[in-house]
Image (tube, grey):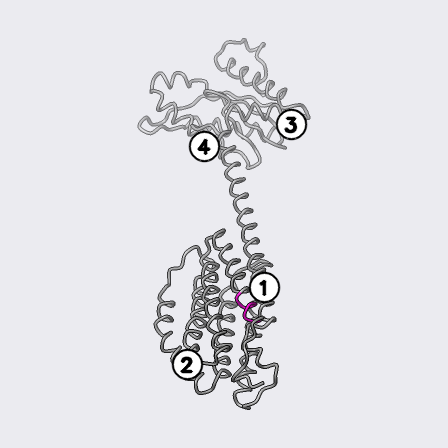
Amino acid sequence: MNPTNPLPDITAFYIQEIGALLFGGVFLFLYKQSRVVYFGLWAVAWLLRLLAAFFGFELLRTGHFGWLAPYAVFEFAFAIVLIAAARAGFASGFQDWRTVLRLISILPIFVALVYAFGWNSRLEGYHASHALVLSGVYIYNFMALRKNAGLGARFFRFSLLVLAAAFLETAVIFFYLYHTGSAPEWARYLQHETYIDFTLHCVLAFAAMAMWNESQIDRIQDLAAEVDHLRRENRQSMDLDYLTGLLNQAALARRVEQPGPFEGVVAVCDMDNFKDINDRHGHLVGDEILRNIGNLLQASIRHQDEAFRWGGDEFVILFHNQLPEVAQKRMVDIEARLRDFRVRGHGVLPIRFSWGTAEARERVLREALDEADQKMYGMKRERAGEVPARERPPAV
């Protein structure tokens, strides 16, 4: 049969219309779920393809070339919208509408040229140019999505590439028929939506759903990681003392209740003259002193060690896996630095600092904490001269 005057294939027409509805519905669903402009533009494109299929069927049924103009308008509007989709990408909005407006402005001129070309070359020339344009559009979408990772995105891009190759092959066949002037019987079916095209578009639609599912899984994982981060930050903020920035008494209580032995050295320290400073200089100065002591303690320990404000002007340091003599030297250094402590507007304001340390030696933390606390009070009483020298307990 001469493909310049083919009989309409009603089955192919129904397949094309049903396919356009199906694919448009899939992309509309994806757009409503994700609000990604790319999917929304694909849904609009398939609506245009639905209208184009009707005019194409009338063109083949009547053989009147007056149907070629509306057919070409909607077919190439389909291509323009797909170009816009490639420009938009997977952003939630589409800002650069200038490309679409420029393409729409030249659409009447382009359609007029295509109409004249189709009138002179009959349908082979029109379908060749149309297939070539669609091949280029699918290639453009393939290139525009090259940054999208994931198996679903790769499958979607592969489907675009296969469709581009299929339409390029169709264009080559029509160009060949246009130059030879004769065609075999099967060539007339190329002017309809073929079963191969329908199958490839089905694969494309399912690949789009897989890509969307993959993006949703990635989004859920990102949200879960963000929630976990916020939960850790919230838990950490609940464990922090707002004034000193150290861990608070509640955090120390939970740490003491943990089962198993503690490996390391516990230090308990307390300011001897903090009440006098508060009474003489006021609570604002006292708060500044506590804040700076917290910074000093935090800067004087390792990353794996822990510093707590036990309450008031009393602090606890846990030196993990540390030797007793090293922990004692660290406490001596802290005490020495506090002797030169300065307060803004008041100059040097020495801080007297009593402390005691205890090595856990595979004991539970509570026992080591009690021992360090007793040594700290022993040092405090010794400095206050409350205990005779022969009865004084060792400081460390």
Q: Amino acid under label 4? A: Asn
Q: CA distance from mark 1 to mark 2?
A: 30 Å
Q: Is residue 279 above or below residue 175?
A: above
Q: CA distance from mark 4 to mark 2?
A: 80 Å
- Provide the residue span drawn in magenta: 12-17
The residue under label 4 is 295
Is residue 53 rendered to the left or right of residue 366?
Answer: left
Q: For numbered disc 2, what is the local secondary structure?
A: helix
Is residue 260 rendered to the left or right of residue 34?
Answer: right
The residue under label 1 is 202
The residue under label 3 is 262
Depth-wise, is mark 4 or mark 2 nearer the camera? Answer: 2
Q: Percent x, y for residue 235?
A: 52, 32
Choose top left, top right, bottom left or bottom right for residue 153.
Answer: bottom right
Q: Amino acid under label 2? A: Tyr
The residue under label 2 is 115
Q: Earlier in the sequence, mark 4 or mark 1?
A: 1
Q: Percent x, y for residue 385?
A: 49, 11
**Residue 13 is a magenta residue:** yes
Depth-wise, is mark 4 or mark 1 nearer the camera? Answer: 1
Q: CA distance from mark 3 to mark 1?
A: 63 Å
Q: Amino acid under label 1? A: Cys
Q: Quadrant of the C terminus?
A: top right
- Please, which residue is most extreme toward the left here? 345
Q: CA distance from mark 3 to mark 4?
A: 25 Å
Q: Earlier in the sequence, mark 3 or mark 4?
A: 3
Q: Amino acid under label 3? A: Phe
Mark 4 crowdedness (10 Å alpha carbons): few <14, some 14-19, many ≥20: some
